[in-house]
Image: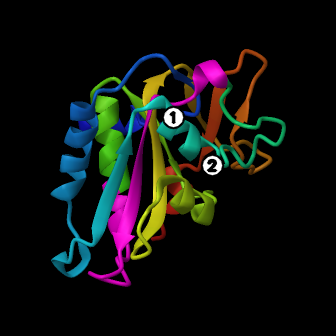
Amino acid sequence: MLSELVLKNRSCRRFYQNHKIKDEVLINLVDLARICPSAANLQPLKYYISNKNETNKKIFSTLAWAGYLKDWPGPCEEEKPASYIIILKDTTISDNCDCDSGISAQTILLGAREKGLGGCMIAAVSRKKLKKNLNIADHLEILLVIAIGKPKEDIIIEKVDSSNSIKYWRDTSAVHHVPKRTLNDIIIK
């Protein structure tokens, strides 16, 4: 059921790093994104996939992981993602792809979750460094990086408390808590 899949699809930031993700799995996830809606059906998105340790290291070094967790620099060596999908915009096709990257990223993450994997959509990227690290052509603009792997963390959705803080946090058992607003807070009548 879709609602169950969406509920399970949390931003996962810790993985079983040695759980390898095959090329076929990543290609299948990109294929799901390929058939998504696209503004004016221009389809300007391209995808760079990686499941190789050396390339993953080049990608990892350009990412910021969790803005609200100030004392956490990101996953440790045993907990890094096994793979990445980088969403790129081909500027020779379009300079504007509106919401295409968000639709594609969420579709990839839902597909990964359906396969028992987890992921994290990352926009905090040192784009110049990543382009250089991977020798990405000038006409391709980095929009998002999606980290994918076998989840190693528990994530709990909870109601925003009386402090009204939406900041996610980790408890002493490393369980990740994600406050969400109620329906009454977000529906305008």
Quick check: 27 above or below 124?
above
Q: x%, y% of residue 125?
A: 60, 57
Q: Looking at the picture, how far across and down is residue 71, in whole percent? A: 84, 36
Give the image quarter of residue 136. bottom left
Please say whether residue 3 is visible from this viewpoint: no
The residue pinned by badge 2 equals: 63
Measured along the vertical axis of the image, is residue 56 above or below residue 122?
A: above
Q: Earlier in the sequence, mark 2 or mark 1?
A: 1
Residue at 38% in and 21% down:
20
Q: Nearer the viewer, mark 2 or mark 1?
A: 1
185 or 2: nearer the viewer? 2
Q: Position of residue 93 (x, y in %)?
A: 26, 81
Q: Which residues are magenta?
A: 77-104
Is 103 above or below relative to 92?
Answer: above
Q: Where 139 sits versus 178, above or below?
A: below
Which mark is on residue 147? Answer: none
Drawn side of residue 179 relative to residue 28, left or right: right
Q: Give the crowd class for mark 2: few <14, some 14-19, many >=20 residues within 10 Å.
A: some
Which residue is labeled 1 in the image?
54
141 inside magenta stretch: no
Q: Please name the residue shown 48% across and 69% down the image.
A: 188
Secondary structure type for disc 2:
loop
The quadrant of the picture occupied by the N terminus is top left
